[in-house]
Amino acid sequence: MISQRSIQDVLNAAQVEEVVGEFVNLKRRGVNRIGLCPFHDEKTPSFTVSPTKNIYKCFGCGKGGNSAQFLMEAEKMSFVESIRYLAAKYNIKLEESQVNKEEYEEEKKHRDSLFIVNDFAEKYFHEQLMKEKEGRDIGLSYFRERGYRENIINKFGLGYAPTKRDHFTATAALKQFKSEYLEELGLTTQRGMDFFNERVMFTIHNLSGKPIAFAGRILKVNKKSPKYLNSPESEIYNKRKILYGMYQAKTAIRKEDNCILVEGYTDVISLSQYGIENVVASSGTALTSEQLRLVKRFTDNLTILFDGDSAGIKAAMKGMDLALEADLNPKIVLLPPEDDPDSFVKREGYEKSKAYLEENAKDFILFKLDRSLEESKDDPIKKSEMIRDMIQSISKIRDSIKRSAYIQQCSNLLGMDEKILVKESNKIIREDIRRKKNQKERSKEREAIKNEVAPDVPFPDANTYEGLEEEAYYGRQEKQQHKQKKFESQDVYQEKDLVRIVISHGANELEDEEGTMCVAEFVYSQIVDVIEYFDNPLYKEIILETVQRVEDGQSIETSFFTNHPNEEIQKVAIDLLSTPHTYAGWEKKSIFLQTQDIPENNYFSDTEQAIRRFKFRKCKRMIELLKTKIDKAQAEGNFTEVSHLLKAYQKLLEEKANFAEKTGLVIG
């Protein structure tokens, strides 16, 4: 097991903007970074990374955390796996205690085991290719004929599956890998035979570089066997969400601000070897919205590079409406009819291929319009169908300004009234909205029916009407309790504000007549007499634990809270430290006076005001309770108690007025 000290070392060293930046295209906004959330579909970025606080937060779906939590969410890693990943990234040696095999097996989750098995399989196929005679003679010869250098073979994890039908399965059994994992991943058949035989192997990686699936290409002509054989989908592999080569290409995609999409594995590898590295493949599947969202995480620009024959054009056209709907800027490059990306780049080389891509990239809408005009020619029926198809595609564009520009351009090229095209576009959009709304409602109805439980209501009898006066009395009590609950819920906001200050500025120092103390100590000293009245026990726990750490001489920096072992405290800290707003260099523009600090650093007056607001609310609460006690004492004729309570009541009214005056609150 990894020691707690090592875990803290890793979390402190891991820079969230670097970790997240490997998966999300981040842009600077003030001191923070923003990007499109990888956890839900969105058009406007609401995903914020704070380098100073070392956390991320999405203000759309609400997810947030530190570097480890991001890896757990984005890559479905376990906590231990995320710590190991970060430790390797930042070259931190982990302290671990020895555990026996049973404890180890209990700790490892099913998902982790699948990754381990696939990692073994990747190494096995690669060793068969590079070290065994059959692999070198058949597999390596094939790759070298295609011109692949050894570094590119290693980079993409290429391999070879031997002819012997149970060699891999037997080797895995010797390593004590469970047969159920081998079968689940599609590496072994139910009869105990190898799934891949006598094929060159392509490893499919996830965004963090872990092998999640394999594709095997047959080299002999065999009509009974498919050209490519792919791993089945599993818990760690969903082909709709994966683009081949994305792990190797993501850095280049960000740098070039463009993603090139090709059809096959070899196209990706050949282009990458010749220096065009921002390239991925859809791995033999039709382009999906999940794959396009993956592209969107790194760039807004997508270039489709397919063969120039009719089949290539047809393939390029598929999925483009999805790209428009994903708010991407799709372009199409068609190669000469006799070429595919692999043959083209080998013949032309890097410079000419790069120039060809830039010069021949055509906007998808205009490309589609040109081809449609050519096909319809003077046939009015075909032309009207073509126009509807064009408007259908344009209507998928989310950005209204971009959509309007395309409609205007199409109007000019088609010689049609722009208003007609706008009207048709709006009609399609309304129908699409209505369709999605209906689908959502039907889904809700199905869920409601699925979860519906018949109410357990007894048939009324004569006894039902007994005790109505008592019920009415308790009804009044419940209303009073509801009123009190509502009142208490308002107090939680003040408690939350105090916790925010303790988490944000607890370690900062304050000076008064008695000397120096940190903000956390100051807050506690001011509320110690009423902290037992906290409505939210978690907020109370945070303040008490913080003060205890101060007394013990331990750190209370914000990282202590954001990396807290208690997930509830961790979530509270991240939520309180996150804000969708940034200060846009006001101090440089002389907006603040010399005596005025930016709000985030003005913690002294912020602390005082928060304490006053808190005590003001608690004072009101005590006054309400005293009113109830006075009414009860009067009803019972206990006038001595009434006199005593009235003195306390008057004292609280004075304190309430004092707090209100200092805080600027209206007394109610």
Image (spheres, grey):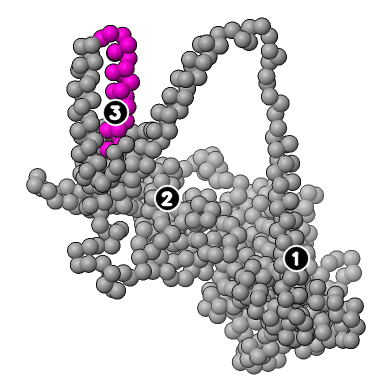
Whether 632 is among the magenta residues is yes
Query: What's the magenta bit mostly, secondary-structure-wise?
Result: helix
Task: Name the residue type under label 2.
Answer: Asp
CB under 8 Å between callouts 2 and 3? no
Q: Position of residue 307 (x, y in %)?
A: 77, 82
Q: Position of residue 594 (x, y in %)?
A: 20, 67
The residue at the point 72 percent across, 76 percent down is 419
Quadrant position of residue 347: bottom right
The residue at the point 47 percent across, 53 percent down is 64
Task: Name the residue type under label 1.
Answer: Ile
Q: Residue furthest left?
A: 513
Nearer-the-camera pick, 141 or 512: 512
SS class of the residue under badge 3?
Answer: helix
Q: Nearer the viewer, mark 2 or mark 3?
A: 3
Nearer-the-camera pick, 254 or 598: 598
Q: In which quadrant of the rendered image does the C terminus lie?
A: top left
Task: State whether residue 583 is above or below residue 562.
Answer: below
Q: Which residues are magenta?
A: 616-638
Neighbourhood count class around disc 1 (C-alpha, 10 Å): few under 14, some 14–19, many 20 upward = some
Residue topped by disc 3: 622
Measure the alpha-carbon separation of dots 2 and 1: 40 Å
Measure the alpha-carbon separation of dots 3 and 1: 60 Å
> Would you say residue 214 is visible in this rendering?
no
